[in-house]
Image: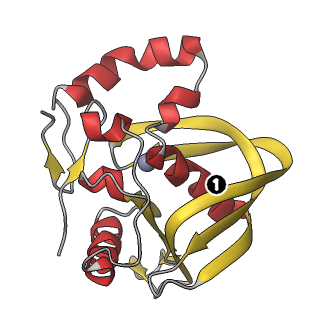
């Protein structure tokens, strides 16, 4: 089931999300719905707060795009991160162009470390510790920010944020059009 995504300005995006325990009801169904929602909106990551659930659950998935046929292949890499904790940041800080399904039509270069060590549980409650690199490391950091009430535009310079202020206010007041379903702020 595709879930509506909340936008910049919605109070849930500013809350610190709560860890869940093993008894959390219907976790697998939620994870399946989050993947479906993310792929339908062409995202590569989605955090539960973006679907208005203030819990520490993240899905990440990359599907290879084939230009010739204009189709997506099967997921090359999928991750479910429950209660993720970034234990360590590694490597140099690099700029990478980020966007966010909750901040439509804004893409900005964000400076973050190129690798992280992240500990989490999967949907079967098996504990993992990954040394994330490349796009995975980038998306982990972006999504864990969501769990801590941050969005990627918070990490831009004051000047850049000032320049984006009107567009961010437009999103906050619902003046934005997306191909995917968004829930109006309240
Ligand atoms: Zn995001």
Residue 144 position within the rendered picture, expressed as x and y whole percent measured from the top left: 53, 51
* 181 relative position to 20: left or right: left
Residue 118 in the image: state x and y as whole percent.
Answer: 68, 64
Horizontal side of 49 relative to 176 (left or right) equals right
Residue to which mark 1 is pinned: 138
Choose top left, top right, bottom left or bottom right for residue 166. top left
> In the picture, which quadrant includes the C terminus?
top left
Q: Residue furthest right?
A: 91
Left or right: 78 as drawn, with respect to 16: right
How many numbered tags mark residues here?
A: 1
Please determine whether, in this image, residue 7 is positioned above or below residue 131. above
Residue 63: x percent and y percent? 49, 77
What is the secondary structure assignment of the residue under circle 1? Answer: helix
**Residue 97, percent from left and from top:** 59, 43
User: Between residues 23 and 115, which one lies in front from this camera angle?
Assistant: 23
The quarter of the rendered structure image containing the N terminus is bottom left
Please identify the quarter of the rendering in which residue 4 is found: bottom left
Residue placed most toward the observer, 179 or 171: 171
Q: Is residue 116 left or right of residue 85?
A: right
Q: Residue at x 34, y 40 (%)?
A: 13
What residue lies at 34% left-to-right and 66% top-to-bottom? 38
Neighbour tally class for label 1: few under 14, some 14-19, many 20 plus, Cα within 10 Å: many
Name the residue at 51% across, 28% down.
154
Q: Above or below — where is 77 with respect to 95?
A: below
């Amino acid at each position: 089931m595709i879930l509506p995504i909340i936008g910049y300005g919605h109070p849930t995006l500013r809350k610190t999300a709560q860890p869940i325990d093993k008894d959390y009801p219907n976790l697998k169904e939620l994870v399946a719905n989050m993947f479906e929602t993310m792929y339908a909106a062409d995202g590569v990551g989605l955090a539960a707060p973006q679907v208005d659930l203030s819990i520490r659950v993240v899905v990440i998935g990359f599907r290879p795009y084939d230009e010739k046929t204009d189709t997506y292949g099967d997921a090359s890499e999928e991750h479910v991160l429950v209660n993720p904790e970034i234990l360590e940041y590694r490597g140099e800080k690099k700029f990478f162009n980020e966007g966010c399904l909750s901040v439509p039509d804004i893409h900005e270069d964000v400076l973050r470390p190129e690798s992280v060590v992240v500990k989490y549980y999967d949907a079967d409650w098996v504990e993992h510790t990954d040394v994330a690199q490349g796009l995975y490391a980038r998306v982990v950091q972006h999504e864990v920010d969501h769990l801590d009430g941050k969005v990627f535009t918070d990490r831009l310079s004051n000047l850049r944020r000032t320049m984006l202020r009107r567009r961010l206010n437009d999103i906050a007041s619902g003046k934005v059009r997306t191909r995917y379903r968004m829930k109006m702020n309240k």
